Image (cartoon, grey):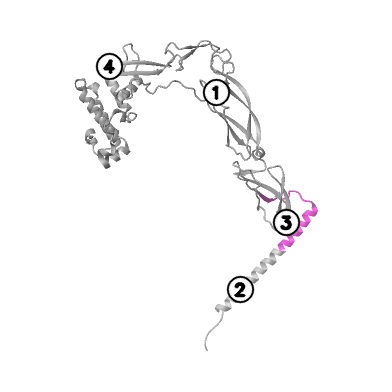
Amino acid sequence: MTEKKDYYTILGVGREASKEDIKRAYRRLAKKYHPDLNKDNAKEAEKKFKEISEAYEVLSDPQKKMNYDKFGQAGVDFGPGGFEWSDFTRFNDVEDIFGDLLKSFFGGRASTGAGADVGAGARTSFFDMFFDRGMDRDMGYERVRPTRGSDLRYDLEIDLEDAAKGMKKEVSIFKEERCPSCNGTGVSSGGIEVCSACSGSGQLRKVLRQGFAQFISVSVCPHCDGSGQKIKNPCDDCNGSGKIKVTKQISVRIPPGVDSGSRLRISGEGGVGERGGPPGDLFVVINVKEHEFFRRAGNDLFCEIPVRFTQLVFGDDVEVRTIDNNSARIKIPAGTQSGTNFRLKNMGMPDLKGYGRGNMIVRVNVVTPKKLSKKQKELLHEFDKYEKEDKKEEEGRKQKKSFSWWSRDKSRTGIGSESGSE
């Protein structure tokens, strides 16, 4: 049966303690009971160190803490054998604690007898030692692997008509590609040898033993950049880089409906990968030029056309251009006001996702003529004369109607009538 423990008492904090309070308490106790700082009583110190680490594992995790507060030890049962170092998951939260322990243990800086720096490697091995990760692992080290090439960007400016109908466009880009002579290896035939510094492992390991503790520093071999191999005879065409710079023509398919800011992805046309990795992608970013006639708003197109005054007065059929370089007709009813909008359905921009087309909105605006013939002026003066007469007659009718209404209202209310008795 697992022994019941009061984690709050073990860390010396109250149940209302904050996360930072819990961390500070663990930091203080970890330094106090670390086995290397209690060599005279190392076995008891190691037991206490494990106990406070168990308490910290529970109280520093919000979910485990909530379960413990509700159900006690049963809410965070670590199994029949109880807490083991493999159950500890909070080492990332307390890396600074162990960094300080290393400093205090080695007097500020850890080094081997030969003066080699152990630093971060010692800190990593410190976790392995106490959290049962095993001393034979690479402790987070990974051999340098093939990496994907970088993505490239190309800005392409097109006309609105091209954005409406779609097109294919040839673009020229300057980029790096895998050297065809060496297939990207950077070496001539038979020009690779095993790195003598790391014996082909791609890593350098340094070991420091102090008491019962063992610290291992693992780093990427600087002589071969972690590949385990060195170039003996570099490729003449790429000088050992495995890459060459080329100017390449790439065909870009622009779908109908693209707008400024649309990004078209062309797989595999980006930068060349490292150490045999796949290439990146090319992203073509579209910029649609402003149009002299149309204004775009989403998938709708707006335009304005000039009309004569008489066209609005008597009505007319007018022709207007479309984005497809065709024409459409608009029927203007008699008496239409200047500034009226007419909508032509499905004559706007095509939707990029294929959901039909937008509309074309046409506004009619009267254009005032700047030059008139003598006859036109005479007719306009005559028109103006009749218009003024009509206006006076209209105002007269309104006044008469208003007076008639006032008279009827006065008779109903008796306003102005005389009354009395003799």
Q: The magenta stretch spans which residues?
A: 362-388
Q: N-terminal of the two: label 1 or label 2?
A: 1
Does the segment drawn in magenta span residue 385? yes
Q: CA distance from mark 1 to mark 4?
A: 47 Å
Q: Which residue is mark 2?
A: 405
Assess whether mark 2 and mark 1 are in contact (beta carbons under 8 angstroms). no
Q: Which residue is mark 1?
A: 272
- Element under disc 2: helix
Q: Which residue is mark 3?
A: 315
Q: CA distance from mark 3 to mark 2?
A: 38 Å
Q: Which residue is mark 4?
A: 210
In the depicted structure, whether residue 378 falls above or below residue 407: above
Q: CA distance from mark 4 to mark 2?
A: 115 Å
Q: N-terminal of the two: label 4 or label 2?
A: 4
Q: Residue at x 74, y 62 (%)?
A: 386
Amino acid type, callout 4 = Gln
Q: Residues within 10 Å of mark 1 (few under 14, many from 20)?
A: many
Which of 326 and 383 lies nearest the eye of the viewer? Answer: 326
- Element under disc 3: loop
Q: N-terminal of the two: label 1 or label 4?
A: 4
Amino acid type, callout 2 = Trp
Amino acid type, callout 3 = Gly
Does the segment drawn in magenta span residue 407? no
Q: N-terminal of the two: label 4 or label 3?
A: 4
Assess whether mark 4 and mark 1 are in contact (beta carbons under 8 angstroms). no
Q: Position of residue 362 (x, y in %)?
A: 66, 49
Q: Position of residue 149 (x, y in %)?
A: 53, 25
